């Protein structure tokens, strides 16, 4: 999270709503060193023991993939999943992913959940966003999954086998489409990705200036 103080508590509620044994969770909140408002808020929340606040030291480039790489250094889980601050994953998502990993061949090291927007009916702009995501995650990517070609990942809710993620060098900190890039590199290394029928809900941009930015 970077300068997202006002949705930090919402993210924590959504993580806590995951139907998964809390003793097996290792949640890392990745915060930037110069974002004191969000850091102070997170430290004031009396978070459960399975949360760790990680303050990413200031350095360039100040990107999401760089922060993810920093968090991965101390990650303890067999599996790693990335969620954005505004994400609301379906409560049974982690269970579905765990079972999928158990049933899929070993070369499947990434499972991508489907993304969509919870405010789709708010106005014309959010309807357009929803139409684009629905086309991509409900039709195109499941079709791509059936072919022996790379599968570009979405920006969130991609679940990895941690060891293999580290082995290929994780995210490129200089690439602002880091997850699409990672999907290509996974394929290049002989690994495969699967799409799962579980959704993560996000908030679509509802005003033109927000979308342009």
Image: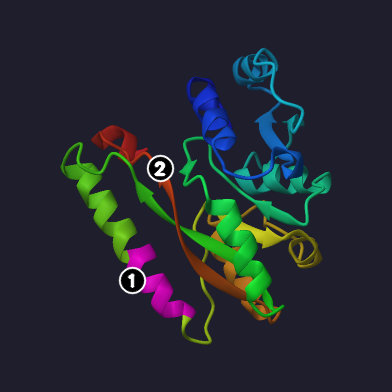
At x 51% / y 45%, what residue is drawn? 91
Which residue in the protein does label 1 denote?
139
Instruction: Tell me the quarter of the image containing the C terminus.
Output: top left
Report if residue 4 is visible in the image.
no
In the image, residue 144 above or below residue 4: below
At x 74% / y 62%, what residue is drawn? 165
In the image, residue 65 above or below residue 103: above
27 and 58: which is toward the camera: 27
Q: Secondary structure at mark 1?
A: helix
For residue 63, side relative to residue 146 (left or right): right
Which residue in the protein does label 2 denote?
202
Looking at the rendered structure, the number of numbered marks drawn on it comes to 2
- Relative image position of residue 81 (x, y in whole percent): 64, 51
For residue 54, side relative to residue 139 (left or right): right
At x 71% / y 37%, what residue is drawn? 28
**What's the CA distance linking mark 2 and mark 1?**
19 Å
Residue 137 painted magenta:
yes
Residue 9 painted magenta:
no
Which region of the structure is painted magenta?
Answer: 136-145
User: Upstream in the sequence, badge 2 or badge 1?
Assistant: 1
**Badge 1: few (under 14), some or many (20 or more) residues near its Cα, within 10 Å?**
few
In the image, residue 144 above or below residue 35: below
Report if residue 108 is visible in the image.
yes
129 and 175: which is toward the camera: 129
How is the protein colored in the picture?
rainbow
């Amino acid at each position: 999270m970077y300068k997202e103080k006002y949705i930090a508590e919402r993210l924590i509620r959504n993580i806590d709503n995951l139907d998964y044994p809390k003793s097996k969770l290792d949640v890392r909140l990745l915060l930037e060193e110069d974002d004191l408002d969000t850091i102070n808020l997170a430290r004031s929340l009396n978070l459960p023991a399975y949360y760790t606040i990680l303050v990413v030291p200031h350095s360039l480039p100040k990107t999401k993939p760089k922060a993810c790489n920093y968090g991965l250094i101390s990650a303890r889980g067999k599996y790693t999943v990335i969620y954005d601050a505004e994400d609301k994953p379906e409560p049974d998502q982690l269970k579905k992913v765990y079972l999928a990993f158990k049933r899929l061949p070993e070369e499947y090291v990434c499972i991508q959940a489907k993304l969509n927007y919870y405010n789709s009916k708010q106005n014309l702009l959010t309807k357009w966003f929803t139409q684009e995501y629905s086309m991509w995650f409900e039709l195109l990517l499941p079709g791509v999954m059936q072919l022996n070609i790379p599968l570009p990942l979405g920006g969130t809710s991609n679940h990895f086998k941690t060891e293999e993620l580290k082995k290929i060098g994780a995210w490129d900190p200089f690439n602002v489409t880091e997850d699409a890039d990672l999907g290509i590199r996974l394929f290049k290394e002989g690994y495969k990705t699967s799409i799962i029928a579980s959704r993560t809900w996000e908030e679509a941009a509802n005003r033109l200036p927000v979308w342009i930015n």
